[in-house]
Structure formats: structure tokens, C-alpha cells
Image (cartoon, grey):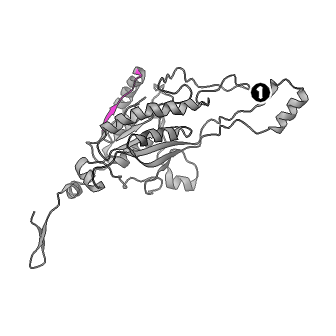
Amino acid sequence: MVLTDPPYFLDKMDDRWDEKKVASTKYHHVIKSLPAGMKFDREQGKNFYEWYYKISKQVLRVLKPGGFFFSFSSPRLYHRMVSAIDDTGFLIRDCFIWLYTQNQPKAMSLNHFIEKLNEDKEDRDDLKKQLNGWKTPQIKSCFEPIVMAQKEPQGTFLENFRKFNVGLLNTHVKIGQDMFPSNVVSTNKINEVVDKCFLISKPDKKEKGDFNLHRTVKPLSLCEYIINLTTYSDKAVVLDPFAGSGTTLVAAKKMGRKYVGIDINKEYIEIAKRRIRSFEVDSSRYPAMSEEKQLRIFEKKANYKRLSKGKIVKVA
């Protein structure tokens, strides 16, 4: 399977991503320029689609039939990413929602623009009162969408699984308070109802690492949840073509899966290697299916014969 967090193609976060240019913004009473990610440009979506179409074609090429492709995105350009994936031939199975409560409100007051108007102070003050509480159309974003796509299986789901070991979901995975796996997940406690249905473990201080400079590190538990849901055995390979600081790879290692990570940033590669070395495989958390059950799944179709005394035996 493929699990990745690519550049979102918002301002300063396209395929020429440079973490030094995407500096955190210190908010002042007057914002002289828009913080990274807030600039609106219709070309961003078009460029994102064209670029991710090429990426998705390569992902489709390397996946086995039935293999899954999960990709994070921003709410504003999610449709462009999904269209690119869809148009390469993937089946769009679902949209996962990573729900959280802590994020920076992006809407801005217009007072500093009003102050620049060539009008009387009284008129400017009246306009400020009129627009009190009304801000630019950038609401506080409290979720991140993750597309769930699948390479078309060969034959039925069962035929594909027996041949390639991929294509089904592990419903033994639980979420919240022992609930059936869901396409909504949260890593923050919100309230009793939401936590009961959607909460997974909260990121701890250790998992990111004090040395990790990456600005968009995803929760390890979220990657573990998706990998555990879609990979069957320790022979499964998890690919992240935009590995960043290596969260997907750490999650794969912890679960005893094979993994391949790719990134253009040499500094991130070294951070990812360091993080991977610090985590060990925890097989106790993800018990493999028993050998007996595996044999039943992969056993070729057999013919059975009923003996005179009612006993059934396999003859072929």
C-alpha cells in the first residue's frame, strides 16, 4: 500500500517545497503579508492536478492489483488531488477525515484596509462598526481529508486477495472504545460521543523527536491505524514517496511491515533514518492471523466426499 503526505500546492507549498520558505508567521496587529497557505490563486489547483496526475500514474504502476493508495490533502484542494488520482484509473473507495480541534484561525479583519481608505475618520469608524466580526472567507480548519483509493482488483475480491495478499480491510482493527473501524479519526479528545466512536491514541512527545524540524509531522497512531487496516502480513510493503521525516516508515516498522521511503530533502532523510532507528517492532500490538486461518484462506478449492457413516473427507 501507499500512504503519503504530499505538498498541498498552497502558496509556497508546491513541488518546489522549501521548509525554510514556509516559516511560521508571528501575528501582529497589522499583517503586512498573507501567511503561507492563505494566498488564493486559481492556478494552484490546476498545477496540483497536473503534477499529481503524473505522481498517481507511477503509484498505480507499482501497486499490486487491489493495493490501496492513501494521500493526505487540504480541504480546499482535495477535489483536485482526488480527480487526478481518479483519472489515472484508481477506484476512489472513500474519504477519511482526520478530525482535530487545535488550529490557527485564518480569517482576517478588514480594519487595516479600512484605515487606508481616503475617507473621513467618521466614515471609516462607521464602516468598522458595520463590519465588526465580519472577516475574510478563511474559516478555522479543523479537519484534514485523506483519500482512500484502490487499484482495480483482478477478478473478485477473494480471487485478488488469494493471489496478491491485498485488497481487503482488517475489521479486527478497532477505533474509539472498541468500535468498528471508521473513516473518521481523531487524535485529540473532543467530547464523550466523538471520543467513543473515533478516538485513537494521542501523539506523545517522543514520537516526533526533539531533532525533527519538519513542520507538518503526522500523528504516528494515525499512520498505524491506516496501515493496520489495509496490510495483511509482515511481507506487505508500505511505500511513502514523500516521506518527509519518516512517520509512515516508523509506523510500518513498528508493525513489522516492510517499507520504502523517498524524499528529495537530504535533511529530512537523515531525520527519518534517526527516527526509524529509535523505534522497535512491537508485534504484540498487531497479532498476526493464526496459521490455521491463513491456510484456510489460501487453500485451493477442494472436493469433498461424504462417507456412508456421515463423515466428510477431502479427496482433492
The amino acid type of the residue labelled 1 equals Phe
Residue drawn at point x = 39 percent, y = 26 percent = 263
Q: Is residue 14 visible?
A: yes
Q: Position of residue 283 (x, y in %)?
A: 31, 44
Mark 1 Cα within 10 Å, few/some/many (few <14, many 20+)? few
In which quarter of the view is residue 21 placed? top right
Of residues 215 and 88, the one nearer the viewer is 88
Of residues 226 and 120, the one nearer the viewer is 120
Left or right of residue 120: residue 305: left
Residue drawn at point x = 35 percent, y = 53 percent = 170
In which quarter of the view is residue 239 placed? top left
User: Callout 1: helix, strand or loop?
Assistant: helix
> Which region of the structure is painted magenta?
258-265
Q: Position of residue 112 (x, y in %)?
A: 77, 27
Instruction: Find disc 1 in the rendering and name its residue.
Output: 113
Residue drawn at point x = 9 percent, y = 75 percent = 307
Of residues 53 and 110, the one nearer the viewer is 53
Q: Position of residue 303 (x, y in %)?
A: 13, 66
Left or right of residue 118: residue 51: left
